[in-house]
Amino acid sequence: MKIGKETIPHSAICTSNSETIVVRGKDLAVELIGNMSFTDYFHLLVTGQPPTPAATAVLNATLVAIAEHGLVPSVQASRMTLAAAPDALQGAVAAGILGCGSVILGASETSGIFLEEIRVRAGDGQDYDKAARQVVGEYCAARRAIPGYGHPLHKARDPRVTALFAVAERAGADMTYVHIADAVEKVIPEVVGKSLMLNVSAAIPAVLLGVGFPMTALRGVPILARTAGLIGHLTEEFQKPIGFALSYQATRNYVYDGELPDNFTPDHA
Amino acid sequence: MKIGKETIPHSAICTSNSETIVVRGKDLAVELIGNMSFTDYFHLLVTGQPPTPAATAVLNATLVAIAEHGLVPSVQASRMTLAAAPDALQGAVAAGILGCGSVILGASETSGIFLEEIRVRAGDGQDYDKAARQVVGEYCAARRAIPGYGHPLHKARDPRVTALFAVAERAGADMTYVHIADAVEKVIPEVVGKSLMLNVSAAIPAVLLGVGFPMTALRGVPILARTAGLIGHLTEEFQKPIGFALSYQATRNYVYDGELPDNFTPDHA
Amino acid sequence: MKIGKETIPHSAICTSNSETIVVRGKDLAVELIGNMSFTDYFHLLVTGQPPTPAATAVLNATLVAIAEHGLVPSVQASRMTLAAAPDALQGAVAAGILGCGSVILGASETSGIFLEEIRVRAGDGQDYDKAARQVVGEYCAARRAIPGYGHPLHKARDPRVTALFAVAERAGADMTYVHIADAVEKVIPEVVGKSLMLNVSAAIPAVLLGVGFPMTALRGVPILARTAGLIGHLTEEFQKPIGFALSYQATRNYVYDGELPDNFTPDHA
Amino acid sequence: MKIGKETIPHSAICTSNSETIVVRGKDLAVELIGNMSFTDYFHLLVTGQPPTPAATAVLNATLVAIAEHGLVPSVQASRMTLAAAPDALQGAVAAGILGCGSVILGASETSGIFLEEIRVRAGDGQDYDKAARQVVGEYCAARRAIPGYGHPLHKARDPRVTALFAVAERAGADMTYVHIADAVEKVIPEVVGKSLMLNVSAAIPAVLLGVGFPMTALRGVPILARTAGLIGHLTEEFQKPIGFALSYQATRNYVYDGELPDNFTPDHA
């Protein structure tokens, strides 16, 4: 069935003949394997260009920052899935990635769009405080969350934020979006009425947009990073399984609040 | 419900308090972000140890080798999924990863187990040719495919294999499994009756086992690598969509070989 | 980590002791197995109530209508995934379901919300034509697609729409949303400037809302239905595999529009 | 890339022109919608034939039996995934389905193969006790689990087993596989050394094979059924979210057993 106008598939990423695999214009076996780190290759795949040294530093830092944060919901889902289906590692990884949505992890892109909105609003004058106050005010009026601000555990500034900003500065990255992100944190108390600190989902776009990483690929960074974290957990799950223990603990205090047939008595009641 | 004996979840990967995130014994924000590449961090997450320089070189090379090979089935599945569900990048990545199974990409682990079987069989004498002949013979007798040998496109040796072996040698990695992989390629014609060249799914375990990468994590390497490739393709899909064009082309020559009701005539018949 | 306020998991769907499984207040083994069809059980699971006869008829009709439409993108993705990972049927089903997104199949819910918007707008006067003209006009002004109208293949009214409306009428269902859906089709040419016929994604909510099926569960109907279709295709894939043939055809006319290294010549060039 | 020999996609499930959708030889809109239940349509899709009345009864019973069993691991994974990615219902369903693996739910197919092995072994003499003793003995010797026997909660016979066998008998199904399943349960204590009662994963193939349902589609039954259960839970999750509560409870007793940096003190220590 024909859906849409385009009928010929085309791509600028890869082609090959029986001897050579070409990726982004380079001979994979001769020019890339052994000559490029995985992080730089990821940049090449996504943008078509090798990264600048600043982009390498910042991209590595963001991938390291977001790959792992303990037994978060997506890791639990992934480990439970491996426990139930140990033959299919790819399925357990997929189950974990499916939790990289708009509420958790996916906020990097939403936050990048938000920071860009303030940059455009500020225009040539670059009064980021004023633009931040306006845009945050509009989000509040529309009852939208400020994407990338506030964290259930890290009430003070998330330590990863400070580390990422330091890496960007040391690498000589453009700090525009970092300044915007700081401006937002500063104006939030007066506009929103409570303090919400920058979290890692705002810091990631702030530093990546400063090294030219494309907005449309932002959401890919937490997904790639988290895949590494998931593989770490699933390797441990093969050795010391806890998937079913997590599931057991999760429901120890479970309350059934529906109807019961006559004569039903819970075990250990 | 209690399944299995373990009821208390434990892990050696990560813990945190409100100020510090600890990963594998290190302070994430202070010791890791900005001080470690993503590849090295992946090694740390999976094994608990930072890599040796040889392991860094080899792990980067394998991740680069396997991340991208054009519009393979899993990439097609992923781009079609994004076309149908553009709001959920994580879903499109997951659909692509689900194609990293036993036939495609998942062969790295199977192949690693196969190479290890030969190493153990060879014992102290290290006569890899003899051990390879035995084990390949047993696989043939059991009608099992030789995992990591043969490729639909690359009839000569896959160029990525040569590149990976060169990286391992240059990095000073233990070449035992590489020698075993070569021995298998050499004995296949006489045992199997036709030539099957080493492909990248045998080369990856051959070089990774030589730098101490754990067998149980082998299958994670193509999955992590392919995630990077998928994000490259999905970023392109957002800009120049071909998901529906792929699906249209796939069925242009479609043959329905079931029954038809009376009076049904195909369009354009 | 605590996210959100709720910490005790509760549910009104199921509980059990060592002898009895209770679902929605009924003893599963005694009252439900053998006494209820799967469709009626689905209704009970989702709403907490067994369906009326009208709801049974309409729910069956919608599930049958949307389960199967040939080698659509999600089916192709699913069959390719099984070809690559034949050990994991659940992974191939999951890959297919991931294509039930906002563009394809997921439109049932969006369309239901759209029809409800018109019903509320019409108010007590029930002038659906006028309310439809207003709401369609607002969607146009906001450059939003009219969800559930237009189809790439069925330019006349999709035959499934007629069939679903007939089932609803015969079953004695409330036809309010059907009338609204018709009104929208009637006003579209003058407001949008071209004809867009009702498709199955508008017909499904139109008939289901008329038998009290909840709005929040609408999107589940195409997902459940499509799962049945996917299992049909995957059973065929095990017997007569075409996953790789689809993938081969999809790229026969593939155009690489990126750069090439010197001396690279495509095969068969 | 060409993988395998087949290059033309063909299927006997569905074709269409601009006016008619044909499924398994029938006009979908005219002959199927409104005239067939979803369960019967599932049978038609998978096997190419409408079910006998016995097959309808048994298939409904198995789908009802396995759709729902409370907050099992796959349901937890699914609800956590929706909590993290509420925009993508299809992703949460997919995450739940990915837990239908070899250990949980996927056992239906393995168990069906096991029962068939005994049937073939018994041959014309139909001494199922003897054949069961042999095959169970071989599984024990090979340290393989007896698929479909034993349950963590239901130590007496799972009540769903009794209900399914009663439905099959009442419907006039062929009871051969049921007798084999009973024979296995009877011989297990003497061969294995402990009692392992029939669970629902053996009862499902026992009754379905008796109405001609194909072995290769067995694993699809729990997947389809569980999809209905997941949609029930996810509809509840939209109304009364517990995804994050489950995740919080799961780790309340979490033990980190890795190294710690100096000076790290857990919160509330």
Image (cartoon, coloured by chain):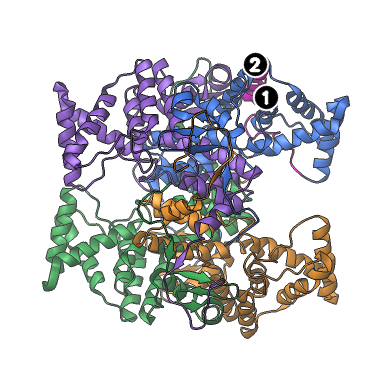
Chain colours: A blue, B purple, C orange, D green
Image coords of residue C95 (percent x, y): 49, 52
Name the quadrant containing residue C189.
bottom right
Q: Amino acid at mark 1?
A: Val
Against B89, residue D154 (above or below) is below
In the image, B67: left or right of D49? right
Q: Residue at x 64, y 56 (%)?
A: C102
Q: In the rendered image, is residue A239 in sight? A: no
Q: How far across and how far down the image is residue A8, in percent?
A: 58, 51
Q: Is residue A214 left or right of residue C244?
A: right
Location of residue A138 (image quadrant): top right
| Mark 2 vs 1: CB contact within 8 A | yes
Residue pointed to by mark 1: A211
Q: Residues within 10 Å of mark 1 (few under 14, many from 20)?
A: many
Specify the amino acid type for callout 2. Ala
**For the residues marked 2 and 1, what is the alpha-carbon distance in whole angstroms?**
10 Å
Circle 2 — which element? loop
Would you name the residue on which mark 2 appears?
A171
Write down the chain letter for disc 2.
A
Q: Tell me if residue D217 comes above or below residue D145 in the rendering.
A: below
- Horizontally, residue C267 falls left or right of residue A118, namely left
Q: Residue at x 16, y 58 (%)?
A: D135
Does label 2 or label 1 sit earlier along the sequence?
A: 2
Is residue A197 something one can see in this rendering? Answer: yes
Q: Is residue A136 magenta?
A: no
What is the magenta range? A144-171
Q: Secondary structure at mark 1?
A: loop
